[in-house]
Amino acid sequence: MDQKPGLMGIDELADRGGVSRRTVRYYIQEGLLPAPLGVGRGLHYDQAHLDRLLRVKALQEAGRSLEEIRGLVRSPARRTTAGAAAEGASAAAMAALPKPIPRSAWRRLELAPGVELHVSHDIALPAPGRLADIADWCRQHLVRTSKAED
């Protein structure tokens, strides 16, 4: 599959947003996230989807209900007259919320007992054979000390 710049699949969106694929689909169904950019399998989500997903999560973590969040994040095209009338109140409510903590997706690899490698989502992992070599090196050279040696 050709990699389209700036686009991601549902698995990557869910992973980067810290939710399940099912949650992404539910949020789209509930109008909390915009619909995918395409149909079928493929890369149909962009940075705007991730930004909205992180915003919804931050609002949830701040104690907002899904109904409140829906009113705060609703896109202009979907706003009802009542929603538009509440826009001023929604903007004030958003301003009162704490700024969300930036999030990033990381992969965690356990190389040896007590030794982990954390790799950012945007860095390609080496081939499995190279990872096995790194893990072997760690097991040989990074040995846990016993309490008696401390």
Image (spheres, rainbow, N blue to C red):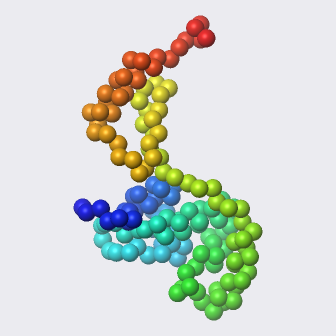
On the picture, is 127 further left or further right than 25? left
Q: Toward the viewer: 65 or 76? A: 76
Q: Position of residue 122 (x, y in %)?
A: 41, 51
Q: Position of residue 39 (x, y in %)?
A: 32, 74
On the picture, is 141 further left or further right than 114? left
Q: Does 3 sit above or below residue 131? A: below
**Residue 55: quadrant of the picture:** bottom right
Point out the residue furthest to the left here.
Answer: 1
Point out the residue furthest to the bottom here.
Answer: 81
Q: Toward the viewer: 66 or 61? A: 61
Q: Does 90 sit above or below residue 104? A: below
Q: Residue at x 59, y 75 (%)?
A: 73
Q: Residue at x 43, y 68 (%)?
A: 46
Quadrant location of the C terminus in the rendered image: top right
Q: Position of residue 36 (x, y in %)?
A: 40, 73
Count of labels in the image: 0
Q: Does 29 sit above or below residue 79? A: above
Quadrant location of the N terminus in the rendered image: bottom left
Say if residue 37 shows up in the picture: yes
Q: Position of residue 8 (x, y in %)?
A: 38, 63
Q: Residue at x 47, y 28 (%)?
A: 115
**Residue 127: quadrant of the picture:** top left
Q: Residue at x 72, y 66 (%)?
A: 97
Say if residue 30 shows up in the picture: no
